[in-house]
Image (tube, rainbow, N blue to C red):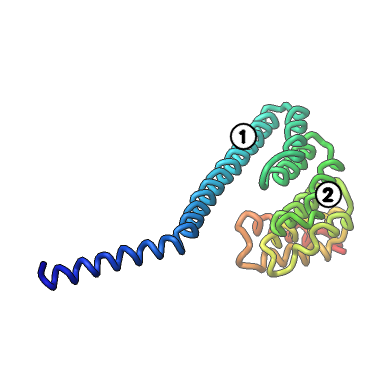
Amino acid sequence: MSDDSFIREVNEEYRKEQARVMWRRFGPAAIGVALAVVLGTAAWVGYDYWAQSRANAAGDRFSAALNLARDGRTDEALAALAALEKDGYGAYPVLAKMRTGTVLAGKGDHAGAVAAFDAVANDGSVPEAIRDMARLRAGLVLVDNGSYADVSQRVETLTSDTNALRFAAREALGLAAWKENRGADALALFDQITGDPAAPGNLRRRAEMMSELIRGSVSPS
């Protein structure tokens, strides 16, 4: 046997022995890590499937409730939405509460509608954007079914220049003011809308019409 062959065999035996030593020292830990990765992945896949299944089921129930409302089966729709509020998954309980307010308003139960929207608006666990929308929806119901103070209580905070709902909030507050013969207050609100280039075109046109109506009145006060 040549010297080179002998050296190669020695090196090979050394590497094998080192490998055995490394395996005895770190092999069990490596197996544990690999097993943890496999189990963790399986758990995540299982949870994701469970969450998706629950979300899909809640979405189907919400869609069915909307169909009931569209078909005029109001009481059935309200019952389906109430059930979804109790045991729905994800955002669907909040959406169900919002839709409940809409359905109640449609059937003429304005107090019930406002209560539904107020419940969402006062729920600190709900995202602020949805709470703001609930405040606006309550205010819009109260324009024809409440006082200026009632509307103001819900939408006044939405009229700031930085709020995305400011135009609709100003319109609701302006209509409530006009209904109570507070012409000057109403005019100021409608002028805010018409003077803002960011206001949606249809809303600006309504505000312009209301401004002209108020200015054409004998004594806007």
Residue occupying the far left of the picture: 2
- Which residue in the protein does label 1 denote? 60
Q: Which residue is mark 2?
A: 142
Identify residue type, mark 1.
Asp
SS label for mark 2: helix
Please tell me in which quadrant of the rendered image residue 163 appears. bottom right
For marks 1 and 2, the one nearer the N-term is 1
User: Looking at the image, is mark 1 or mark 2 nearer the viewer?
Assistant: 1
Residue shown at 81% from the left, 59% from the top: 217
Q: Residue 59, how many percent across, how many down?
A: 62, 38
Any part of residue 143 in sight: no
- In percent of width and height, residue 124 lies at 78, 57
Residue at the image point whose x is 61% and y is 58% from the top: 200
Q: Nearer the viewer, residue 54 or 142?
A: 54
Q: Is residue 216 above or below residue 67?
A: below
- Res. 214 image quadrant: bottom right
Q: Tell me what residue is drawn at x 53 percent, y 49 percent.
A: 39
Q: CA distance from mark 1 to mark 2?
A: 32 Å
Q: Secondary structure at mark 1?
A: helix
Quick check: 145 above or below 153? above
On screen, residue 145 versus residue 7, left or right, reads right
Q: Amino acid at mark 2?
A: Leu
The location of residue 212, given as percent across then percent down, is 73, 60
